[in-house]
Image (cartoon, rainbow, N blue to C red):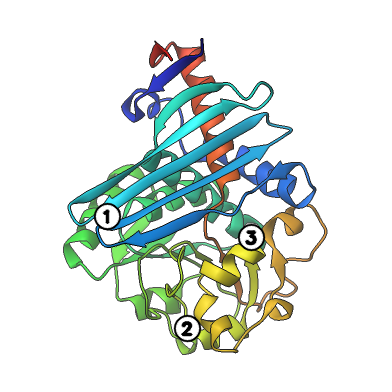
Amino acid sequence: MSRLLVIRSEEYAPHLGVKDCIPAVEAAFRSLVEGRAEHPAKYHDRCPWGLWFYMGGHVFDQEAMAIKLGCAAAVGGSCQVIYYDGATAEPKALLEGLRVTHLRTGAAAAIGARWLARPESRTVAVLGAGRVCWSSLEGLSALFALERVLVADVDPEATTRFVERGRGAFAFELAGATIEEAVGQADIVVSATPARAPLVASSWVRPGTHFSAMGADGAGKQELDSDLHRRARVFCDSLDQCLKWGDINNTVKAGGLDRDGLAGELGAVIAGRVPGRLAADDITVFDATGLGIQDAVVARLIFDTAVRCGLGTWVEL
C-alpha cells in the first residue's frame, strides 16, 4: 500500500521560494537536451464546457517524476500535481498545481534572462500584473542587481496593486507605465498574459533587450509581434512545443519563421552546445510554453522540504 503526502501550498510557502527552485529548473533544462530527462508532449483539449489538460516529466539525475492535470470551465478551474519517486515510480505527494506552476515559471523566466540578457541589466518591464510576473520578478531579483521595474497591465487597478505590493517587498523602484513606455525603457521584459494579438511592437524595442515571453501556451496566443520574432534571436524551452503553441506559433503558421530561423533551445545554451547572446545589441527572446520536467523538479523540492520540516498530511492509498 502506498503512502501519499498531501501538502498544502500555505504550508511550504514560507520555506521555499522561486530563487530556491532556480538551480533545479536550470539543471532540468540541461538534462533534457543531454538525454537525461523525458518530456512527453503535453495535451489539452477544448470542450463545450471549457478545457482540460495534462503534462508530465521525468528528470533522471534528480530522480524527479510528476504529472500535472487540470480543467477549467466558465465558473473556474483547478489543477493538481502528483509527484512520484523517480527511482521507484511510487506516488509520493499531491500538490495544488497553480503554486507549482508559478514557482517553476518564475524560475524559468529568470533562467532565460540569466543566459540571454545582458549581465548589466538593471531595468525590467513586467507585462501582466499577475502571479506569474510576480514570481518572475522574485527570480530576477535573485540574479540581477535591479534598480527599476515598470509594470503594465490592461487593468490599472491590477497595476497599482502590483506596484504597492512590490514596494513593500523589494528595495528597487517600481512604477506603473504603459506597455510602450515600459518596453522602450527595459533591459529585460517579462510578459505573462493570455493575449491572442501582439501587445509589443518591434518598433518600441531597443537593441540589446531580452524578452522572457511566458504567456503563450496554446495555438493562437501571441504577445510579441512577428517583426520582433524575425528581428530577434529566439530560443525555446522546447522547439517542437513552441512551434505548435509558443509565442512564435502564429508567425510560423503565417510562413514568417521556421525551425531553421530559431536559435535553439535554452537547455542547449546552458549545456554549452549553442551560443546565446552574440553581441550586446542582440535582441533575445526566450519563448516558454512550460515543460513537465519543470513541474517534476519543483515538486521534488516541495516534497523534500515538507519531509524535512514535518509538513503535510500522510494518507494511505
Q: Secondary structure at mark 2?
A: loop
Residue 206 x, y percent position in the rendering = 53, 82
The span from disc 3 to disc 1 (Cα, nearest Å) is 30 Å
Residue 112 x, y percent position in the rendering = 60, 58
Q: Nearer the viewer, residue 241 or 98?
A: 241
Of labels 3 and 1, the one closer to you: 3
Going by the numbered disc 2, the residue's amino acid type is Asp
Q: Which mark is residue 225?
A: 2
Q: Secondary structure at mark 1?
A: helix
Q: Which residue is mark 3?
A: 238
Going by the numbered disc 1, the residue's amino acid type is Phe
Q: Secondary structure at mark 3?
A: loop
N-terminal-most mark, 3 or 2 = 2
Of labels 1 and 2, the one closer to you: 2
Residue 42 x, y percent position in the rendering = 53, 53
Going by the numbered disc 3, the residue's amino acid type is Ser
